[in-house]
Image (cartoon, grey):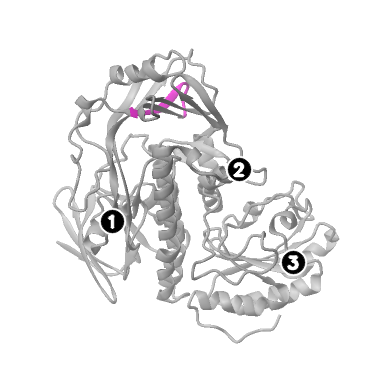
Amino acid sequence: MAHTGTTTDVLIAGAGPVGLSAAAELRRHGVRCRIVDRLPARLPYAKAVGIQPRTLELWDRMGLVRAVLEAAVPMRGQLVFVNGAESARIALALPPEVPYGFAALPQYETERLLEEYLAGLGTSIERGTELASFVQDSDGVTALLRGASGFTEELRVPYLIGCDGAHSVVRKTLGLSYEGGAFPEAYMLGDVVADADWDLPAGYALRSEHRTDDGTLDDVLVCIPLPGAGRYRMSMKVPPELAGPAGSRASPDGPAHGLQGGTGPGLSELQAVVDRLAPGPARLSDLRWSSVFRISHRVVGRYGTGRVFVAGDAAHIHPPTGAQGMNTGIQDAANLAWKLALVVRGEAGPGLLASYDAERRPVGEEVVGRTVRHATRGMEADRDDMTTLLLREAQLLVGYRDGPLAGAPYGPVDAPQPGDRAPDCGGLSTPIAVDPRRLLDVLRDRPGHVALLYGAEATGLSRAVAAARAAAGERLPLEVVALLPRDAEPDSVPAVGAPAYRDAAGEFARIYLPDGATGFVVRPDGQLAARFPLAATTAALTDCLRALSVPLRDPVVA
């Protein structure tokens, strides 16, 4: 057995999209991490395929989004058929200020892009290596790693993140509850090509149902477009001969969830369902892979204990309705990583880590409840208008207003407030750039907190810039950006002592509704931490630091 000292700050178990996202975010913040996975290579399965607009915003800030956009295909809408008749045509249209739409990308491609991004930061997956066991104490975690050859390594690390799926070793070792249930039906998945005569509109998914006279759903076909001509990931109820026993993958904590072992369906089984339910004839070919899939719905009772945390499927599993699972897990990783980074670097107190459970577990519970409701009763079970429903599916309404880090509200009640997502906007100009910038352009590659200080008067902005920097000092990585209103003189933009932009299109003012000279703090995960009058910059930043358990410097009055 090999023994290693503390040369790693965080060990991550599991190299799926969630574990890779956690590693990428940690490395972007300068944290040393190792990521291990028991599999020798990526699985070639298009399991999670939906990419939500909120995930694309996070990847934009990381600098990853261009590669994703070049590999993915747009999701423009969904056709719904019931008993052979079209019952709904849903356009996935979001408000114009939302920078990204819905997209589809096979999970193996998502993993490839994240792995390449992570390698560019100097970290590679240790494949064929699994977390066998661990123990933690007040000072750290001692983990036992086991390689495929039988080689073992004892590793001492400050923190451990379990991104190791529905049957998580990390969750089980912590003894966390994992309450929920399971769907009795099994489903089959297939990655196939439908011939060119199939006339589904480009970028549209298909859901075709058969319901009995009393409204019971007894047959269903769901087709999600994938990159490649005529390629779809199809899911449907499995015939009894392929289903296997209902608890075939049950473990002591109960989840029978995900891809099943054994024989997957062939083209003939998939074709039979398409022949029954597709709105027009389609001949299937080029089956890349297939599997039987079972669905459970569970959420962990706590997202971590001490120095050990769970994320993604290790914390919550649910129906694939609305493509919420992987995206929710990626947001788990983004939420946890910046907090761990501040604590590892000594820039925040360890109490900050309790906010991970406080902010993310309510989100996991809401997603599990909503996806179960949609899977069993349809999206029409929610009474929200279509715009609100789509914003929620896009994960743009996820917020932490009731969380421990949200500052006091300020300004109009309908304005973005602390805990909310920081919306994007366009039309930001500088005296040099010909083309206007988006707010996401301004935030990109700024991994820490960013203070956005909005005001019309250069002298007041300069004082607020100085106050923000002094309050943060060297303890909190805070970058300051000044924003001037659209009627500001262009020559006044560079005169405020910080990178500055003019709200030339008035979009920032329209979306953020500043109450006169107003400041905002954007967290590393793209949520608002604070909103305040510029005259109270010192007090607002002091409160922000207190929420992070950061020792305060002598105040500088704005």
Q: Which residue is mark 1?
A: 178
- For the residues labelled 1 and 3, the Cα–Cα distance comes to 45 Å
Mark 1 and mark 3 in contact? Answer it, CB < 8 Å: no
Q: Where is 111 relative to 224, above or below? A: below
Question: Label 1 sits on what residue type?
Answer: Tyr
Q: Is residue 272 left or right of residue 78?
A: left
- What's the magenta region? 227-236
Q: Which residue is mark 3?
A: 515
The residue at which mark 2 appears reads as 387
Query: Residue drawn at (46%, 75%), measured in percent from left and top?
Result: 348
Q: Is residue 509 above or below residue 230?
A: below
User: Is 152 positioned to the left or the right of 548 in the image?
Assistant: left
Front tag of 1 and 3: 1
Q: Is residue 335 visible?
A: yes
Please tell me which residue lies in front, 277 or 266: 277
Q: Nearer the viewer, residue 369 or 288?
A: 369
Is the N terminus in the top left, top right, bottom left or bottom right quadrant?
Answer: bottom left
Callout 3, which amino acid?
Asp
Q: Is residue 175 above or below residue 19?
A: below
Residue located 81% across and 69% down the image: 457
What residue is shown at x 57% (from left), y 84% (from top)?
553
Q: Is residue 286 magenta?
A: no
Element type where label 2 sits in the image: helix
Q: Quadrant of the C terminus?
A: bottom right
